[in-house]
Amino acid sequence: MATKTASQPLQLTREADIVHLKLRGPFVLENARPVHEFLAQVMAETGRCYLLADMSQMDGIPTDTRRYVGEWHKQHTVSGVAVYGASFATRALATLMFQAVRIVGNQHIEMEFFRDEADARRWIADHAAKRFGATGGQHVVR
C-alpha cells in the first residue's frame, strides 16, 4: 500500500511482513477498518504480520474503534505490535485495548512500547528471529 500524504491522518506502508502505521489525531473507526484489512492481507500473503505503530501524534481511541479492534482480533492474530512515540495517556489507552483483546479473543498478542522507531524495529527483528528462526532476509527488516 502506498504511503498517503503527510496531511492525511493515516499513513500505511508495508515492508515485507511489517505494516508501518502512522496516525495523527484520534484512531477512528473509518481508519481502523482499512488498517486491519491491510494487516489481514499481509498475514494471508506471508503467514505473519508485525505492526509498527508511530503514535507520537495520536490523540485517543474512541469506544467504537476499540470494540472493532477487539472483534477483529477474535479472528486474526498479528505476530507482534511495536509502538513508538506514544504519550503516557496513549500508552494507557493502547494497553487497555490490547488487554481487552487478549481477554475477549483469548489470545496472547505481544505488544511493546519504545521511545523511537529504531528500538521498535530492533524488537521486531529480534522477535521474528526468536519466533520464526529468521536471521534476516525478506521477512525481517533490520
Image (cartoon, rainbow, N blue to C red):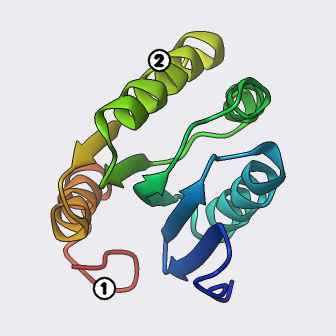
Q: Of residues 117 and 76, which is closer to you in this image?
A: 117
Q: Is residue 120 left or right of residue 12?
A: left
Q: Amino acid at mark 1?
A: Gly
Q: Residue at x 65, y 47 (%)?
A: 27
Q: Residue at x 34, y 51 (%)?
A: 82
Q: Residue at x 53, y 46 (%)?
A: 78
Q: Residue at x 39, y 76 (%)?
A: 139
Q: Which mark is residue 27?
A: none
Category of crowding for the residue at label 1, using alpha-carbon neighbours closer than 10 angstroms: few (below 14), some (14–19), many (at least 20):
few
Closer to the eye: label 1 or 2: 2
Q: Of residues 15 and 62, which is closer to you in this image?
A: 62
- Determine which quarter of the picture holds residue 67: top right
Q: Amino acid at mark 2?
A: Gln
Rounded to the nearest angstrom, the CA distance separating label 1 from label 2 is 32 Å
Residue labelled with disc 1: 137
Badge 1 element? loop
